[in-house]
Amino acid sequence: MGRRTGNGTRAVLTLALAAAVTGCTAGQEAADPADAASRWTHGKGSSGGFVVQYRTGGKAASATAYLRTRRILDKAAERLNDTVEVPHRIPLVVRSCGAAEPAYDPETGTVDFCAEHVEEIRDRFAHADRRGAPGAGDAHAAAVLEETAYHESAHALIDRLGLRFTGREEDVADQLAAVLLIGQGRAGEAKALAVAEDYALAAEETPFDEADLLDEHSLDGQRAANYACYVYGAHPTRHEDLVGAGGRVTEDRAEGCPDEWEQARSGWQRLLAGHLKRQV
Ligand SMILES: [Zn+2]
């Protein structure tokens, strides 16, 4: 299954299990008939690096329009290409995926960025109780979609660059996303907190069950706490409100968050040694 296990993906989870699809590195889906009439953009010739490809037909039309207007994936690809030297061309393809989740496909070396996921995230924040300024929900959705791009791109980098580590790949992929978001400074910290909110909302909407416990992803509530811990750990004095009652980080865990953040950052720094164009 794909990126997340929260609300709106329960049926997907069942279908994905039935199809023995196993995670963000799921096998290739059958081609979308609408793809035949697709218009491809943002190609980068035969050079390496991340490129965004939009399919404008059928069910992908609305998601494509949303993503293109805000340049969410274009900016994410630029950040990735400014950060990492990748000899391979890695397309981020915006398409309708049916029941599948966003995923990197090691057989094609492509990230499928699903229109259905875009709509799910936009819907979650449109319906959530938003205490922020007008447009906050839209900014939150954009932040979560940027995080999805980094998370799936992490799977692509792990595969294409042959990166080896211990621990769960899904957690390691979340850590790269956190590093790339929080590395943007205050604006990026706000984005990472939007991601934490998204996972917390998903956890509230759908309590976890046994299938979630058997899944390769950490639970939504854990992923929410992880992102909040990284943000707090990166700048404790800025984010004291995240700790304790009303926050997403317990006082016990908060003590270790600076170390957790530094491990995530320096861990990816080491993993990408020899491929980095700049420090992360
Ligand atoms: Zn993943």
Image (spheres, rainbow, N blue to C red):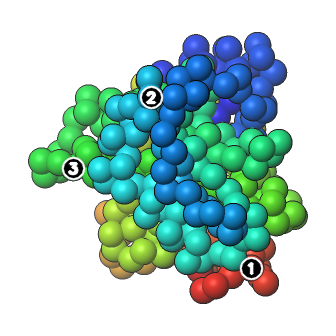
Residue type of the residue flagged with mark 3? Ala
Q: Which quadrant of the figure has residue 57?
A: top left
Residue at screen point 81% across, 21% down? 20
The percent position of residue 160, horizontal first and vertical second, equals: 81, 60
The percent position of residue 6, horizontal first and vertical second, equals: 52, 29
Q: Nearer the viewer, mark 2 or mark 1?
A: 2
> Can the viewer see residue 280 in this picture?
yes
Residue carrying label 1: 275
Depicted 1 relative to depicted 180: above or below? above
SS for dot 2: loop
Q: Which quadrant of the figure has residue 106?
A: top right
Residue carrying label 2: 57
Residue type of the residue flagged with mark 1? His
Observer-nearest of 100 and 195: 100
Depicted 183 relative to depicted 64: above or below? below
Locate residue 152 relative to residue 21 in the image: left or right.
left
Ranked by sequence position, the earlier of labels 2 and 1 is 2
Question: Label 1 near label 2: C-beta < 8 Å?
Answer: no
* Quarter of the N terminus within the rendering: top right
Depicted 133 relative to depicted 85: above or below? above
The percent position of residue 139, horizontal first and vertical second, equals: 28, 52
Crowding at dot 3, Cα within 10 Å, few <14 / some 14-19 / many 20+, comes out as some
Ranked by sequence position, the earlier of labels 2 and 3 is 2
Observer-nearest of 63 and 117: 63
Residue at screen point 34% across, 74% down? 186
Label ID, residue 136: 3
